[in-house]
Amino acid sequence: MRILVTGAAGFIGSKLSERLLARGDQVLGYDNLNDYYDPRLKDARLARLNPLDGFSFVRASLEDRAAMDAAFSDFKPERVVNLAAQAGVRYSLENPHAYVDSNIVGFMNILEACRHNGVGHLVYASSSSVYGNNRKLPFAVEDSVDHPVSMYAATKKANELMAHTYSHLFGLPTTGLRFFTVYGPWGRPDMALFLFTRRILAGEPIDVFNHGHHTRDFTYIDDIVEGVIRTLDRVPGPDPDYDPLAPSPATSSAPYRVYNIGNNRPVELLRYIEVLEDCLGRKAEKNLLPLQPGDVPDTYADVVALQRDTGYSPSTPIETGVARFVAWYREFYRA
């Protein structure tokens, strides 16, 4: 198939593109290579994709409507995976306009381009952050997500609502994936594992929020990509069991689905740090700090729906995943 992947120079997008190309799909990567974090890492990911048969690339932003329309018109994608977004919870407190530009205006452009170019399925990144102040664990797709605690989370919730509107009005099949704390080789430098590794190797203290007691459903990159591909290949239709008198947020009378995609095994942050210390062979000096604004104490993915519909089965324990990350980090940075 011809598949357009936005955010193709990003962490998940680059790995997904690699897997799609390996199975014989044609991939158009779309990314603006912005400097939210070191663009050299994005360039290095892209350098691994450029020589592969079937890969082409457009450098542009989601909010650039003309560039988006041209990419769709020229490439004629059959399916689209939208992974490009302004990421990060804490940064959304400092620069909320960036999230509206990329995650709202940009997603609107994606929806319109899919609608007018006959795309057969749009899969897009949502986030576990949509659960916000919800304290019922594990988080299930049937739960209410009406209390976000960051602008980032609010834009991801908005994406789900916008996608449903297009599924309902225009019959565009859409699937939203609520990612839970993705980690692994080629990961994002603004995330905890990357930050901790760099500081521990430099002999610097690490900032541990909520005194290390919050839990995260850390999910290894290969498990995430497997779930994305399984979802991409399963085009949703109207849910025959949808009840308008007792509506589920996860399905619809339209061709629309929302899934959690996580490891289904939450780990306390202090344990995660212990595993990292073992892999690095040195101890961390910890600055124990309170919970940050916009953060939530715990995440835990109920993935029953994704398992039922696609056979998704995450299998990488953190001991394996963190060790693979550390090996990659040492090689990439010669640390």
Image: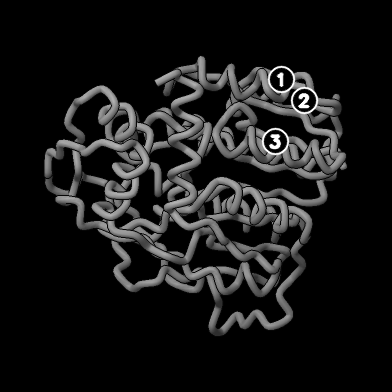
Residue at the front extreme?
281
Which residue is denoted by mark 3 in the rendering? Answer: 5
Along the viewing direction, whichever of 123 and 154 lies nearer the viewer: 123
Q: Residue 108: image x %, image y %? A: 61, 39
Residue 58 shows which numbered tag?
1
Sequence order check, earlier mark of 3 and 1: 3
- Say few, some or many: other residues with alpha carbon within 10 Å of mark 1 (under 14 / 14 to 19 / 20 or more): some
Query: The disc labelled 2 sits on which kind of residue?
Result: Ala
* Element carrying mark 1: strand
* 43 sits to left or right of 76: left
Q: Nearer the viewer, mark 2 or mark 3?
A: 3
| Above-or-below relation of 168 to 116 | below
Along the viewing direction, whichever of 260 and 200 lies nearer the viewer: 200
Distance between the alpha carbons at the discs numbered 2 and 3:
11 Å
Along the viewing direction, whichever of 51 and 146 lies nearer the viewer: 51
Query: The disc labelled 1 sits on which kind of residue?
Result: Val
Q: Residue 133: image x %, image y %? A: 29, 61
Q: Residue 201: image x %, image y %? A: 29, 26
